[in-house]
Image (cartoon, helix red, strand yellow):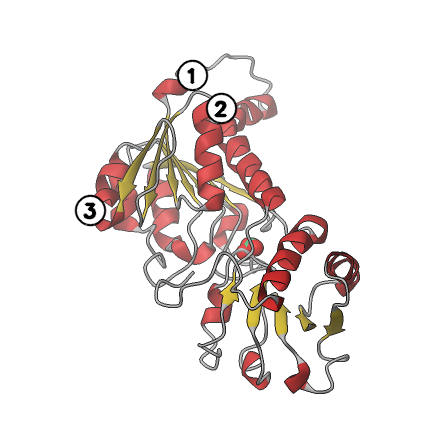
Amino acid sequence: MIIAFINEKGDPAPWREVLTEEVPGLDFRVWPDEVTDPAEIDIAVVALPPPGLLKTFPNLKAILSMWAGVESMLLDPDLPRDVPIGRLVDRAMTRDMMHHAVHWVLHYHRDAHRYAEQQRHGKWKSIPYPEAAERRVGIMGLGALGGAAARALSDLGFTVAGWANNPKSIDDVEVFLGTDGLIPFLQRTDILVSLLPLTPATEGLINRTTLAHLPKGAFIINAGRGASVIDEDLIESLDSGHIARASLDVFHTEPLPADNPYWNHSKVDLTPHVASHTTPRTAGREVAQDIRLVAAGKKPRNLVKLDRGY
Ligand code: GLV
């Protein structure tokens, strides 16, 4: 197997190490320097490949993503549509995302933001908080990441529901489905965690209308994709007090431009797309497993379905 590593911002060295160790005989070529004949490449292992590039490899058997989210690749009008694409699902990444969701839910549940403000004013005052079971957490997207977050938050005692496209079963987690389930899901959600992939159906889904269905004082945690949110609508809901506070890790444009109003918004907790990272040591083993499957004439796991967009 000859693979092309296509990741202009990533360091190929740790990937070369783990993939060649996991797949004996693997020929690992870093694009562009080490790819002299694109026809030789069997598999492209990619993160944010430049549009138009993948079609220049005529003999690809698979495309394997080093990212969980593949939306930017799917926007490539020249994406070879008959080549199977595998999305990254990695235990370490799933665990880190679960930590991020748990961290921010606990942060808001136990008023960490209000104590930080009180400290700035030298104020000693305890704030009553509801029992965890009275705090209704709602997870949008119940895939690998959202499912793990839902389980962990439910284990911590929160009343957890999820919103998904397809039926899922998670102990003690009520699942709301599709368009019909959206409004009832929002109406019962005090802390909304979005781990949605970006697809035509989820773009702009968190907007003035949907935000209005959340109870007054709800919190938003977005670690899925920035474009799921209409920023002006969220800012308006924060300013009116309908939404209490938002933790945002992902944005329409990253890095977030210096003049973006989120930077200085007093009700926004901003992190620079760090909720969960791809770590070559663990993710490399997942990619290696798919390389072995493809070498054996099989398809990668976690196949992207082009019609649903993830
Ligand atoms: C990160 O956002 C990813 O999609 O892996």
Question: Which is more N-terminal, label 2 or label 3?
Answer: 2
Dot 1 corresponds to which residue?
129
Element type where label 1 sits in the image: loop
Question: Circle 1: is it few (<14), some (14-19), or many (20+) Cα within 10 Å?
Answer: few
Question: Could you tell me the amino acid type at mark 3?
Answer: Asp
Q: Which mark is residue 221?
A: none
Determine the image quadrant of residue 280: bottom right
Determine the image quadrant of residue 13: bottom right
Q: Residue 102 at what x, y percent from top left?
A: 52, 31
Q: Is mark 3 within 8 Å of ligand 1?
A: no
- Give 156 or 251, whichever is nearer the viewer: 156
Mark 2 touches mark 1? (CB < 8 Å): yes
Question: Could you tell me the amino acid type at mark 2?
Answer: Asp
Q: Is mark 2 within 8 Å of ligand 1?
A: no
Question: Could you tell me the amino acid type at mark 1?
Answer: Tyr
Specify the quarter for ligand 1: bottom right
Question: Which is more N-terminal, label 3 or label 1?
Answer: 1
Q: Residue 148 at what x, y percent from top left?
A: 49, 37
Q: Which mark is residue 111?
A: 2
Dot 3 corresponds to which residue?
180
Disc 3/disc 2 C-alpha distance (Å): 33 Å
Element type where label 2 sits in the image: loop
The answer to whether 120 is drawn above or below residue 269 in the figure is above
Identify which residue is drawn at 48% across, 52% down: 261
Question: Which is more N-terminal, label 1 or label 2?
Answer: 2
